[in-house]
Image: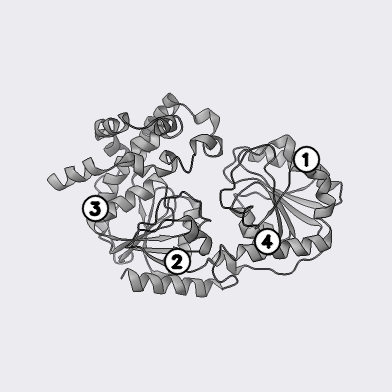
Amino acid sequence: MLSFIKQILKFDPVINNYAWSSMTLNRVGNFELFVPKGRAGLFIRLFLYIYKGIRSVSDYKFFSGYEISNENNSKLLFYYGSLNQFKALNPIVSKVRGMTISENRCADFKLQYFNCFLFSFLFLPITVLKLISVNQYVFNSFRFNLDGYLMSIGYYVEWLRVLNKLSPRAVIVSNDHNPSNRALISACKSLGIKTCFIQHAPAVCGFPALDYNLALLEGKHAIACYDVAPECNVKFVGSYISSHVNNNLSEADNVLFSTGLVSNINESSLVIKNILELNKRIILRPHPADPRLELWKQISNNHNISFSDPKLESPITALQSCNVVIGAMSGLLLESAVRSKAVYCFNGQNTVPDWYGLIENKVCGTLSLDNLKSLANIFDFENLVIHSAQCFKSASYYYENIGVGQDEYLNQVHNAIHECLL
């Protein structure tokens, strides 16, 4: 009991919410990219904390839910808290035969969110005392993530329960900054369980240091972004995404136009109109988390262009029929470059940071409202050939071994996990 109390008192909800508490990442200054304006505000975030806790009562299984059977008994435990994390880890799970756990995805075990909420409520006085003395930047972040700060200790305590029940030898995650992931890693450290991080998206400068037993990274760009703890063993394994490479650039008639969470509809419509005037075919693809999907679908109908539903169609499928990609800053631009597409970033008048260094590292060109007249030059076939080659060459900085098949990628991951963790 004394050891448990020490662990609770040592836990830091500010560090656990690194994505919002880090001044380097500065999510507060770009909050609209992460939190809709209607969900910002201290009282709104407090309401969401209570509302989500009450709503999760239906999942209440305090004394069950983590029972191991012969079918799912494994030394490895994989956790994924989002669709992207699931997509990154699911092929690896099948290869190394691990147990899986998630609060909102199909898995061997369901992380009990109500238990997390219950524990966070029980230890609320301790959390509040720790949040009273934060700096001004962290205090400002409460408007967008107060519920995350309050929930952190609940995740931590529930993870201690899970790990004691399942007794894995190692835990594998693919996100380094979300509260649930960071609470899990903290619980592993408290119990002396090995940890592994598998990169699933381009790294961002300012992300937390790699403080795992093993980190499997996609390429040199990642190691340039991350600080690495002395005990962390880093290996480059590339990504199975980079195995889907198409070096054939045919006639430049097909354009994938992707939008972001803060993309302006009028600005986007203006670009679409200018592209159509050049007799190009367009596929419109919104961001999967954009609540305006139906509105974007209506825009595509108004312009009589194709629509790629991000909830139904994978990026790979959407990219197969396109030679040119114009879109808001996102990882999709990198995925396009590695497939030898001619890639251009268009953010309109929004000041979206170059999160992944794609513009800086010449993975993509830029298009602005001021130079829409240059679209004709962009679609000149000779220019497209040169630009797509530049995009592909620059993408190799992000991915080790571009063109390696998924089987070889999975073998590298499998061997690294068994060598360093088991």
The quarter holding residue 240 reads bottom right
Identify which residue, 149 or 73, lies in the foreground: 149
Residue 406 x, y percent position in the rendering? 54, 71
Sequence-wise first label, 2 or 1: 2
Q: Which mark is residue 370?
A: 1
Out of 230 and 153, give the one closest to the viewer. Answer: 230
Q: Secondary structure at mark 3?
A: helix
Q: How many residues crowd around disc 4 within 10 Å: few (fewer than 14), some, or many (20 or more)?
A: many
On residue 391, the disc is: 4
* Residue 315 spot, x, y in % from top left: 63, 56
Marked residue nearer the N-terminal end (3 or 2): 2
**Which residue, given by chain and number where applicable, does mark 3 sit on?**
190
Q: Are marks 1 and 4 in contact (CB under 8 Å)?
A: no
Indicate the amino acid at tag 1: Asp
Q: CA distance from mark 1 to mark 3?
A: 54 Å
Q: Is residue 397 visible?
A: yes
Place of residue 78 in the rendered image (x, y in percent of width and height, measured from the top left): 38, 59
The residue located at (56%, 39%) in the rendering is 33
Instruction: Identify the secondary structure beneath mark 1.
Output: helix
Work out how far the residue at label 1 is from the one at label 4, CA to CA, in angstroms.
23 Å
Left or right: residue 121 compared with residue 135: left
Q: Amino acid at mark 4?
A: Cys
Q: Earlier in the sequence, mark 3 or mark 4?
A: 3
Q: Secondary structure at mark 2?
A: helix
The numbered mark, 2 or 4, whose residue comes first in the sequence reads 2
Q: Amino acid at mark 3?
A: Ser
Mark 2, residues whose alpha carbon is within 10 Å: few (<14), some, or many (≥20)? some
Residue at figure coordinates x 12%, y 45% from the top left: 2
Q: CA distance from mark 2 to mark 1?
A: 45 Å
State yes or no: discs 1 and 3 in contact (Cβ < 8 Å). no
